[in-house]
Image (cartoon, rainbow, N blue to C red):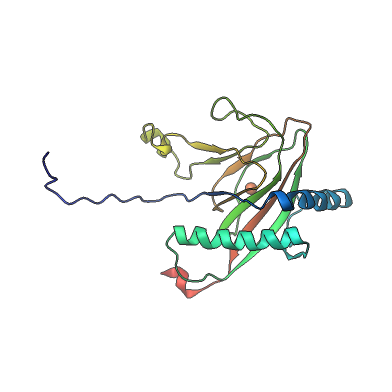
Amino acid sequence: MTADLWDKRFTQLWTTHIFERKLTAHAEHNASLAKLILALDADQNDMTVDYKGVDFLSRNEPGIIWLRETIDETLRRYLQACNITYPIRRDIQAWPNVNRLGDYHGPHNHGWSYLSGTYYVQLPEEKAATRPGEMHPAAITFSDPRYGAYQHSIAPDASASARQTFYPSPGTLLMWPSPLIHYVHPNHTDDIRISISFNVILEWSNDYAG
Ligand SMILES: [Fe+2]
């Protein structure tokens, strides 16, 4: 066997970091979170879309305290994976979502934020879609932010698809860069979809500018 006659280095550039975790302690908190969110939803018009200024994680129910600590820990791991080794100054703004039959979120991103995420409390039960891109009541799809890049990529490189779909289950926590365009599939079932979305908003630090 011939040894390589040249030094090599493989660099991944312009990577999109999407973090997906399944939280092991979700079973003991999801029932109380669902009950709390449904009570708030019954009490308030447009709770799901009226998210501005909502500070859901500042509540003191045990499930909320657990979720707040879990999001903090997930954020630490996310930054580690991005090789960010200094503490960041940030605020986290969260709001609950209840989606019923026919509800969906069209393509959008989360302005004026650094990272965004969703924790899934309760989802319609349906087996995974049979082919990529098919509508699924528990799914969220992300679009490649590099316009047209997929047309120059070949399978099985993940870039060969302009869209990537995730199929979360109760207890899943997703975190992604806020500028990333995504959409939440229509809930075409009679089961309710309950989730908690959040934005990580940065306060300025001189470290950010490198
Ligand atoms: Fe969103």
Query: Residue at (54%, 72%) from the top-left corner?
Result: 204
Residue 160, image x and y in percent?
Answer: 41, 34
Q: Which residue sits furthest right?
A: 43
Judge from the rendering whether residue 61 lies leftward or rightward of residue 77; answer left or right: right
Q: Nearer the viewer, residue 108 or 198?
A: 198
Q: Nearer the viewer, residue 116 or 192?
A: 192
Q: Residue furthest top?
A: 130
Q: Quadrant of residue 202?
A: bottom right
Q: As displayed, is residue 56 above or below residue 182?
A: below
Measuring from the top left, give residue 9's x and y in whole percent: 25, 51
Q: As drawn, is 82 to the left or to the right of 202?
A: left
Front residue (pair 86, 109): 86
Relative vertical location of residue 95 with respect to residue 102 in this rendering, above or below: below
Image coordinates for residue 48, horizontal then vertical, percent: 76, 48
Quarter of the picture containing the C terminus is bottom left
Image quarter of the N terminus: top left
Residue furthest to the bottom: 206
Count of labels in the image: 0
What's the residue at 44%, 68% (across, down)? 85
Residue 54 appears in the rendering: no
18 vs 186, nearest the viewer? 18
Residue shown at the point (62%, 59%) measured from the top left: 71
**Residue 110 versus residue 165 in the image, above or below:** below
Q: Is residue 66 visible?
A: yes
Q: Position of residue 144 (x, y in %)?
A: 48, 42
